[in-house]
Image (spheres, grey):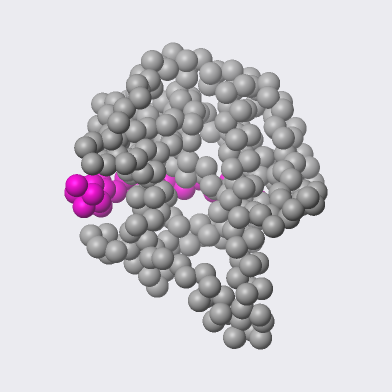
Amino acid sequence: MLSCLLGAAGILLIGISAIVYRRHRNRRAAMASQPPVKPGAGRTWMTVTQVLDAYFPVFDSLEKARHYAEQHGKDAQAVYDTWQLTSDRSLQVSKHLRKQIIHFLNNPGYQPDLKFCYKSPNAGNSHGEVIRLDCEWQLFTAFLSKYDLRPVRINWHLRDPIHGIHGIVDLACLGEDDKLDLYFWSRSSHIVTEIDGEQRLQQSSPFHLRAPLDDLPATRYCRYQLRASLLAEMMEVDFTLKVGHLWLVVLHPNLTQAAVLSLERDREHIRKLLNDLR
């Protein structure tokens, strides 16, 4: 608890580094420009998430809730409503955290809003639930203190007009040999578990993606790996830039330190996916 409360203090420690980050980012900002474009004939824009959703198995929440309710003697509708509420809360909190990170990296003196008021879709005029993000922010500032990042672009929106795909790279930094290292933030609890300070990747799943990606497990890590690989492909094709490492940074309050996971570039499955979209 003490470490979480000290998270805000990390802001002062990062300020000087953030100023250095801005210099690198502005120096190469011109390469990030992309005029408004339209997708190819007969196509409409899809997000990277929408593209990947089509290959991952559909999770039937209501059926799962019924099965869970039968096993535990609970009301199926109540279980389903709780799951939906938890999912929506997590999504809204993650969006708020990502917004604070963007503001902070763009403006070194920015004071993050670490208090998020969540109102459920059926809350009506209630004041909502206050959720603190001190722990997540401490993980983020500690991550910045530990790694010597040289950001070039923050919240980079990429578009592939040929396939009609668009998506966002959370952070692009200068890496080795002037290549760009791509970073992605996550607040998910379904990627890494931590037991006695040891972090373990959740890699197993009884389900697989649909063809032609059916040899891949339907895990959250796999989803991020494909997302990062697809965006790296778009960056190299549309901007003729060289991409180096892909990183996933997990900022969940159950962790004692940010989980920094290397995402292996999966060119083979991205080629299959893009060919399948033609």
Where is residue 207 drawn, in percent x and y?
38, 70
Where is residue 232 drawn, in percent x and y?
33, 37
Where is residue 199 drawn, in percent x and y?
55, 57
- Picture residue at 31% right of the left edge, 41% below the top: 44
Is 222 magenta? The answer is no
**Vertical arrangement, residue 51 with respect to residue 70, above or below:** above
- Picture residue at 62% right of the left edge, 28% below the top: 104
The number of numbered badges drawn on the structure is 0
- Picture residue at 72% right of the left edge, 39% below the top: 114
Image position of 3 (left or right of 256): right
**Which quadrant holds residue 123?**
bottom right
Image position of 228 (left or right of 210): right
**Vertical arrangement, residue 208 with respect to residue 15, above or below:** below
Where is residue 227 drawn, in percent x and y?
38, 46
- Picture residue at 34% right of the left edge, 33% below the top: 159
163 or 176, which lies in front?
Answer: 163
Q: Is residue 219 visible?
A: yes
**Vertical arrangement, residue 164 with respect to residue 109, above or below:** below
**Which quadrant holds residue 237?**
top left
Q: Is residue 134 visible?
A: no
**Vertical arrangement, residue 194 with respect to residue 153, above or below:** below
Image position of 14 (left or right of 24): right
Is 268 magenta? The answer is yes
Q: Which residues are magenta?
A: 255-278
**Which quadrant holds residue 68?**
bottom right
